[in-house]
Image (tube, rainbow, N blue to C red):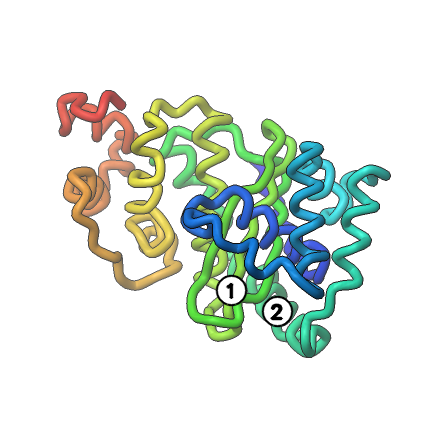
Amino acid sequence: MVLKVEVIVSKRAYLLGVLYDLYHVPSLIENDHLYVLNAGELSKFFYVGMMLDKYGLWRKAFESVIGLSSDYESEKYLEILDDIDIYRWDLLKAELELLASKLITNIYPNIKPKLLEAFKNILGIDRVFKKSFIIIGLNPFKGLFGSLPVYNGEEYAVATTITNLNVKPEEILDLTIHELLHGLIRVNNIPIPEQYEEEFIDILTPEGFLSKHLGLTGTVKSSESPLYPVVKAYFDEKQFERGVSLIGYLKNRLNQTYHL
């Protein structure tokens, strides 16, 4: 199993990631009132999103910003993002690059062996992405947000983490694993019903039982999900050391209530 990671910090990639979220994360646009901001500099920003969405160019645009390919049709819209100003971007970019460097140099190499082992023995994941790109962008407010805009079978995946400057690199990696799991569940045909997928992954990471197992956090956030006590028991009992997968354990304990 191989899981190479590359972190990308660029204004173009960051703005593309934010645009993708605006168009694909329901909670951001559930009231559909962002049209009131469509003036001045912001109108350029929304225009790019509108065109990428209209012509189905999101994948090509992301492949361009991560350096996999170049596409004329998407490039003409990405060039518009280069003209959009972000105040003190050079300073902010330097701080984001410092976070990225710590993640790649200090955190991920130590976590990777245990992560791959957990994927295989806990979740039954045999096929991982050959390369995962993490786009790190700036959230000027509180919180850390992520998404998985595109992935292509086992070849690659692109995850975004939009973060403030006070987070730890461990938190960024934790959220990235959360987003990658959405794709890996599908690539490996893990039988988690779509309606329970987010609930299931939330209990694992970020700051879930898998987060703690990997050493990314010292505590686990609570949840009212009926899955929570069962997953907790699985990790408390270290069933993975006995060759028991989490999916198999859930099936037995829940009597297929969730049809896993």
Task: Answer with left or right where residue 50 lies relative to residue 27.
Answer: right
- Secondary structure category for the residue under label 2: helix
Which residue is at 75% across, 57% downward? Answer: 81
Upstream in sequence: badge 2 or badge 1: 2
Q: In this view, does 38 lie to the left or right of 12?
A: left
Give above or below for 74 relative to 11: above
Which is more toward the observer, 97 or 104? 97
Q: Contact (CB < 8 A) between labels 2 and 1?
A: yes
Task: Please tell me which residue is depicted at 39% across the width and 40% down the height of the picture.
Answer: 118
Quarter the C terminus occupies: top left
Residue that appears at 63% across and 36% down? 156
Which residue is denoted by mark 1 in the rendering?
163
How many marks are shown on the rendered structure?
2
Rendered image quadrant of residue 45: bottom right
Residue type at tag 1: Thr
Residue where numbered disc 2 is placed: 96
Q: The disc labelled 2 sits on which kind of residue?
A: Leu
x%, y% of residue 142?
43, 70
Query: In the rendered view, does 65 fall on the left or right side of 222?
Result: right
Q: Which of 37/224 is in front?
A: 37
Q: Which of 102 and 32 is in front in this view?
A: 32
